[in-house]
Amino acid sequence: MPKLRKVLVANRGEIAIRVMRSCRELGLATVAVFSEADRSALHVRTADQAFCIGPPPSRDSYLHQGRVLEAAKKAGADAIHPGYGFLSENASFVRACEAAGIAFIGPPAAAMDAMGEKTRARAHMTRAGVPVVPGSTEPFGTVEEARAFAAKVGYPVMLKAAGGGGGKGMRRVDDAQGFDSAWRAAKSEAMSSFGNDAVYLEKYLDRPHHVEIQVFADQHGNCVHLNERECSAQRRHQKVVEETPSPILTPAMRQAMGEVAVKAAKAVGYVGAGTVEFLVDSGRHFYFLEMNTRLQVEHPVTEWVTGLDLVALQLKVAQGERLPFDKPLEPRGHAIEARIYAEDPAANFMPSPGRIQYLRVPGGPNVRDDSGVYAGYTVPTVYDPMISKLSVWAPSRPEAIARMKRALSEYVVKGITTNVRYLRAVFEHPEFVGGDYDTGFLQRAHAALLGKDDPALTEVAVLAAAVHAHQREVARAKTLPTRPGTRGLAPWRLVPRGRAKALR
Ligand code: ADP
């Protein structure tokens, strides 16, 4: 494949900008596509060229293969980077790109096909000798069949949509009585979300950890893993915070999981960046969950500890270059990412789109903000409300947590509600700080995390701490000899009188 010159990014928001940054550093021209809802979006302003590809609904714009390809042809782009979501895991789009003579920055369509449906992936992995979460590898024909299988596997079980993704189409069933209604609900959710009502079943693992391995393969048969990411801080089966290294992994586990991930990728002829997801049970056994055949949202933490630019590497691999390493890179230090959402944690995390009136993003040593917004921008209602990903690096985990808290304290977004305070509470929570938090952590800690989210409570806590500190100062001042010319401590007040009354 000849050298790339111009890349169309078939995505929006922070990931489109993230991809364009690497393109620019490599000297590649960039093309944005956008819907009518995104005319003033930052990714449109970032690109060298931009094409409107349709009305706001994704199916008419970002998911419309014909319009994306038409824009690529018009612009003379020789490659399309899909980012994550939208068309990134759509094998028919990969084939359409191939037919149009445009490079798709991602794996071959066949590898995507093999990993696309959860049941198909489980069957492939079982054949390749990769341990999968116990359960079925075929969707069930009837509820009787499924119920009998659940009894064999043992409750609790998880009903899952074969074509599922994004945490949707999953239902935990605790006993036989609840099975039939859960089955009906899972099937109808699978149909409405994925247009495919095939449902299979897995053993429900109790308090597992979600640990995933980044893999990278080139076109010359080299495939290497780039360590793990701990993604157990989840809400409704969706990741909120990610970190690497995983606090629960031993070097031996890392090596074993890494080798299995590479085996999984090789079994399907993988090329490019991919992620093999595992669940780790309380006995520290690990099981293949699924493979995401694209760049992940949380890839920056891997970049922090490896020093690599994964998007640049994707582009180089697409040009036929060899991976610049042939064995796993030792992780250096510790990295954490937090997803910043335009949402209201106090209102059941309801999206909170609207106009950003003021924005101050954190900076300082080893802090990175991958953002898709700016002051004056209106977060649209039609798309995912994630506005940015904040990530930090430090030599050790405690230092990384301290840095993340400091960075979040600098993050100011006015005009819309965000989950910034909620995230700060996560990083202060003893279970997170302890490091052994499983996928149920955020749910269990819900009330505590929201309590911290209450601005009035936070102010009371600040007030109490300040009073305490002042009392300590007073006590200390009393024990100190008074210097000539000083009159002890100045009169002290934390908040104006009226505000103090309101707080009482
Ligand atoms: P999706 O593709 O929708 O993201 P996944 O299969 O990757 O779904 O699972 C997402 C999350 O759901 C996991 O990280 C885990 O928290 C939970 N989960 C999935 N399967 C199981 C299971 N068998 N037992 C317990 N938790 C599970």
Image (tube, rainbow, N blue to C red):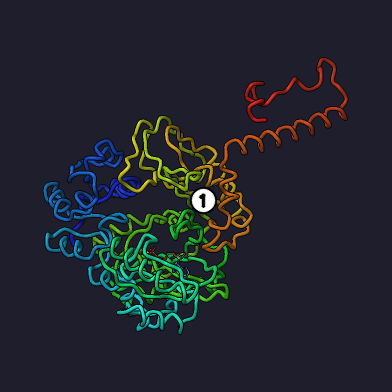
Identify whether 5 is placed above or below 207.
above
Identify whether 204 is placed above or below 235.
below
* Image quadrant in which you'd find residue 152: bottom left
Q: Position of residue 444 (x, y in %)?
A: 57, 58
The one of 102 and 51 positioned closer to us in this rendering: 51
Identify whether 96 is placed above or below 258.
above
Quickly name the residue at label 1: 393
The one of 320 and 10 positioned closer to us in this rendering: 10
Q: Amino acid at mark 1?
A: Trp
Q: Position of residue 474 (x, y in %)?
A: 81, 29
Q: Position of residue 173 (x, y in %)?
A: 46, 71
Q: Which quadrant, please, contains the N terminus?
A: bottom left
Q: Secondary structure at mark 1?
A: strand
Residue placed farthest to the top in the image?
Answer: 485
Rendering quadrant holding ligand 1? bottom left
* Image quadrant in which you'd find residue 81: bottom left
Residue 317 can be seen, yes or no: no
